Image: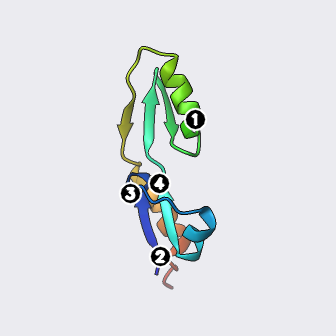
């Protein structure tokens, strides 16, 4: 069994622990100053806060795209013949 969730769950497990438990986390998307990032993929938390401090813009978050989930399912769910 595999568990697929998004970063909003707040799981604080190491990548090794997540892999061992078959948990796959899809990153949330955050837009700041017109640029869109996938949290902890395109931008680290530290980098995000540096950018936030350097702008007057407020960040906007959004759920992962359906295709992000679909890619995980395609990778882990066996194809039926």
Figure coloring: rainbow
Q: Are marks 3 and 2 in contact (CB under 8 Å)?
A: no
Task: Look at the numbered disc 4 and give the secondary structure of its residue.
Answer: helix
Give the residue drawn at x 44%, y 30%: 31
The reply, left or right, for residue 30 in relation to residue 47 is: left
Q: Name the mark nearer the viewer: 1 or 4.
A: 1
Location of residue 51 with respect to 79 vertically, above or below = above
Mark 2: give few (<14), some (14-19) or many (20+) Cα within 10 Å: few
Q: Nearer the viewer, residue 73 or 25?
A: 25
Q: Nearer the viewer, residue 70 or 81?
A: 70
Disc sitting over residue 35 in the figure: none
Disc sitting over residue 46 in the figure: 1
According to the picture, the residue beneath numbered tag 3 turns out to be 9
According to the picture, the residue beneath numbered tag 2 turns out to be 2
Q: What residue occupies the far right of the structure in this picture?
A: 16
Q: Position of residue 68 (x, y in %)?
A: 47, 54
Give the residue drawn at x 44%, y 41%: 29
Q: Are marks 1 and 4 in contact (CB under 8 Å)?
A: no
Mark 4: give few (<14), some (14-19) or many (20+) Cα within 10 Å: few
């Amino acid at each position: 069994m595999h568990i697929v969730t998004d970063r909003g769950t707040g799981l604080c497990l190491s990548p090794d622990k997540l892999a061992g438990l078959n948990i796959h986390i899809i990153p949330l998307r955050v837009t700041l100053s017109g640029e869109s990032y996938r949290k902890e993929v395109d931008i680290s938390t530290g980098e995000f806060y540096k950018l936030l401090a350097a702008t007057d813009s407020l960040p906007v978050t959004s759920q992962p795209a359906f295709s992000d989930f679909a890619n995980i399912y395609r990778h882990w769910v066996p194809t039926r013949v």
